[in-house]
Amino acid sequence: MAQAAAVAKPPAPPRRRRASATPRRLPYLLIAPAALLMLGFIAYPVISVFYYSLQNYNPTKPWRNGYAGFDNFVHAFTDDPVFWDTLTFSAKWVFVEVGLQLLFGLALALIVNQTFVGRALGRALVFSPWAVSGVLTSAIWVLLYNSQTGITRYLADIGIGSYGTSWLSDTSTVFPAAIVADLWRGVPFFAILILADLQSVSKDLYEAAEVDGASRFKQFWHITLPHLKDAIILSTLLRAVWEFNNVDLLYTLTGGGPAGETTTLPLYIANTSVESHNFGYASALTTVAFVILLFCSMVYLRLSKFGREAK
């Protein structure tokens, strides 16, 4: 009987092996080297800028180097009129550029979203300027604005304007000329993002609106725009930051001139550091620009209710 009971007794369940933590950690271990490199390349420059903003640092005048505290910031806000002029122009540049790029980009996206013959070619032509680098864009427009071989010469041939006119050297025309050059490259950015979001709008919404008798404008206002809200907010924020930091186009087109009319704050920072070698003061201006962009971005996202459904 004892032997039968021993035979009938079910075997003990196998012990569960403890799952190894290595497979779960493996993805993090694989991306750790790249993450550390990115952190180093990002963190070190940022920390260096904050450090040098509190220093008097000019390699050409080492006897003046040393701890400055907040003197660089006090000088920027109280004794440097160029800082305020460049900050004002930067705000003007960002507001005009981003506003016009959004309007033209939205219009282009709505056009190329329609069905027509040659739509693929039309989309490629619309988006092609975005593939051109900023320096190459500047070189193209420098040639177009050349007083001897550019647009002004052909306009003078038909009686508009006079020969030898340079829009980039005239204080009354340099700002619109620079705006047009940057629009050519910036508009496709908005068109690409908005068109991508337009593709996800359900056609049933428009069909239902047509059945209800809604006009094209009402469909755009009540269906298209609400759907594009987050895409517009994100694209305008990104483009505003990029336009604020725009250096290559204005530096190549005008060099900040004439008479400092097109000098943005980043361009002033570049001139202060590279030409004047005043890296301490340039770092302080960079810190101020960083705080301004961070504050404006937070306020903009807060007021625009990004990521939240409209009630």
Image (spheres, helix red, strand yellow):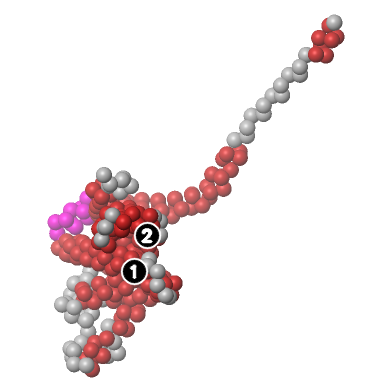
Instruction: Check disc 1 and report its element: helix, strand or loop.
Output: helix
Residue 143 seen in this snapshot: yes
The residue under label 1 is which amino acid type? Answer: Ile
* Image quadrant containing the C terminus: top left
Task: Identify residue type, mark 2.
Answer: Leu
Q: Position of residue 122 (x, y in %)?
A: 40, 74
Q: Is residue 301 left or right of residue 131?
A: left
- Residue 181: % across, % down: 29, 75
- The spot of residue 310 in percent (x, y) is 28, 46
Between discs 2 and 1, the one toward the N terminus: 1
Q: CA distance from mark 2 to mark 1?
A: 11 Å
Q: Is residue 74 magenta?
A: yes
Q: Are marks 2 and 1 in contact (CB under 8 Å)?
A: no
Quarter occupied by residue 134: bottom left
Q: Depth check: 121 or 252 in front?
A: 121
Residue at horizontal 84 percent and vertical 6 percent from the top = 2
- Label 2: how many residues lie within 10 Å, few (<14), some (14-19) or many (20+)? some
Q: Which residue is mark 1?
A: 111
Residue 116 lies in quadrant: bottom left
- Which range is magenta? 69-80
| 190 to 300, vertically: above or below | below
Report the residue at 37% width, 62% height from top.
Answer: 195
Q: Circle 2 — which element?
A: helix
Q: How many marks?
A: 2
Q: Is residue 276 magenta?
A: no
Residue 268 badge: none
Q: Residue at x 31, y 61 (%)?
A: 239
Residue 125 versus residue 70 in the image, above or below: below
Looking at the rendered image, the quarter that the N terminus falls into is: top right
Q: Nearer the viewer, residue 16 or 294?
A: 16
Read off the residue under disc 2: 198
Tell me the crowding category of disc 1: few under 14, some 14 to 19, or many 20 or more residues within 10 angstroms, Cα based. Answer: some
